[in-house]
Amino acid sequence: MTTSDPRRWWALIAMVPAVLVVGIDSTVLGLALPTLSTSLHASTSELQWFVAAYMLVFAAAMVPAGMLGDRYGRKKLLLIALVILGFGSLACAYATSSSTFLAARVVLGLGAAIVLPTAIAAITVLFSDEERPKAVATIMAAMMIGQPIGPLLGGWLLSTFWWGSVFLINVPVVVIALVAVATLVPESRGRRDTRLDPLGIVTSSAGLAALTYGVIKAGETTWGDTTALTAMGAGAAILTAFVLWERRVRDPLIDLRLFREPGFTWGTALATLVSFAMTGVMFAMPLYFQEVLGMSAFANGVRQLPMIAGLLVGTVLITKLAARVGDKLALALGTGILACGLIVGGTTGMTSGGGFAMAWLAVCGLGLGFALPTAMNAALGALSAEHSGVGSGLITALRMVGGAFGAAILGSVLNAAYRSRLDVSALPTQVGAAVSDSVAAGVAVAYKLGSAALLSSVRTAFVHGLDVALLVCGGVAVVGVVLALAFMPRRAQAADAAALPLAELPPSEAEGVESGHGVVIAK
């Protein structure tokens, strides 16, 4: 299959359900946590680890996963990842203890970490520079669409069946993806004659995992927490050692010369920044819909559909727009629209209601649909297809770390603003502490006490916190506009193709393959 073969579009469609599963997994767990606490007798610490374990494995495994795809075959690895996701989903659904459920979440995180960089790397191989933006937009849209599907289907399943059913959502999607990938996606890989970089693999994984854990811990406690600071410091030190090692090793895991390319550097940076800004929306809005407006998890998912509609419109329009005005202006426009949506959201009041939220969420979705595919495409354009797996793993890992920082920082901002407006002076110390802990706890206490005044105070304080957090997100997006205009090249420069003639390939690789984009692609 070549970049002119029409079957490449069927291959792209085949990868959509694989990425969709990852999007679903990122939101569906939150619905089941209260039930898991009772059914599995899970402590608060164990509930936190259910969330953290997935993210830690996700962060640690993406770069090595990309390397394995480059070396041994991206289709092969994608199929293995889908099997892992299916097995992990079944294990989650039928777990009988906290320990077995935690192990299943680790398995899910590993599968998700393999799927994303492998699918994105395959896009780099299958599509030309002109068509890649549309393909990237499709994959990004599939990832984002999966996030509201989790609350929508999960909320209905949780209220209709037992808690394990919310994790079975993945299974039919995985089966469809397995069949589609097996029949429609061609095999592709880089050259096998390069040396492995074991120390690079270990240090990159350990550094990303430690940094992510520290950020998650800081979000759960405070930024002065000793464990959080130690983990973040260790992660930063290990990643520094990784960079120093990569500069001297003969065959590095990551070619640091990539960062000399403005398209890669600023595309990755702005994709990470957009992920940071959108975390405020993904983190705070479900709480707003459920705790302030009193909606169910299912209704919460429905209210987020306008954002997905805006995203889909943006991903359809951005390809032609970027071709006309260039990556710089398209990315600046997308981040600007996103900033406008977030700033308008930051004016939410107690009487604003769901319709107002849906309107500005649609604007945010449109901006996201413009900005994220453009930034990702600019970064991917600097990758040689031979090493696209490692490169896409790095881009995705940095985006995930940016999202983790966003959740922790914005969570701290929201909580501080929430507590600053909360009136618990008339409550006993222990009850006041519980109300100050979170809006969910505050609403629960208010209902238990039958206090309309406390309920009003809790909801008003949370809306204030929401506004502050969204305004911070809007400010971050404004910074993104400035950075895009100042540093992004007008058009990302494509990587040099290092294609080898068939005659120069090893005999085992020259049979039944074509050489294109510097990568071996099976017919």
Image (cartoon, rainbow, N blue to C red):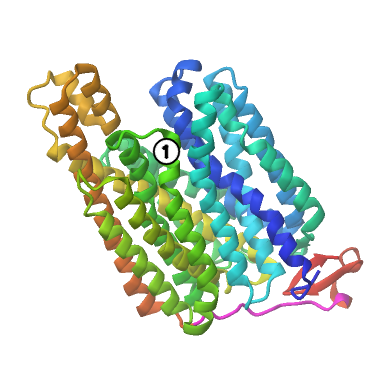
Quarter-of-image position of residue 392: bottom right
Residue at the extreme front of the image, as rendered: 355
- The x, y position of residue 431, in whole percent, is 18, 20
How many C-alpha atoms fall within 10 Å of the one at disc 1: few (<14), some, or many (≥20)?
A: some
Q: Which residues are magenta?
A: 491-502
Q: Nearer the viewer, residue 342 or 77?
A: 342
At 52% from the left and 40% from the top, the residue drawn is 150
* Residue 253, visible in the rendered structure: no
* Side of 486 relative to 70 (left or right): left
At 25% from the left and 40% from the top, the residue drawn is 224
Q: Is residue 47 magenta?
A: no
Residue where numbered disc 1 is placed? 299
- The x, y position of residue 355, in whole percent, is 32, 49
Q: Judge whether 18 appears above or below 379 on screen.
A: above
Q: Judge whether 90 appears above or below 474 on screen.
A: above
Q: Judge whether 500 appears above or below 191 on screen.
A: below
Q: Secondary structure at mark 1?
A: helix
- The x, y position of residue 493, in whole percent, is 55, 81
* Side of 202 relative to 368 (left or right): right
* Side of 33 relative to 290 (left or right): right
Amino acid type at mark 1? Ala
Quadrant into which the N terminus falls? bottom right
- The x, y position of residue 461, in whole percent, is 18, 39
Q: Is residue 495 magenta?
A: yes
Quadrant into which the C terminus falls? bottom right
Q: Judge whether 147 appears above or below 429 on screen.
A: below
Q: Nearer the viewer, residue 272 or 250?
A: 272
Q: Nearer the viewer, residue 477 or 154?
A: 154
At 25% from the left and 44% from the top, the residue drawn is 414
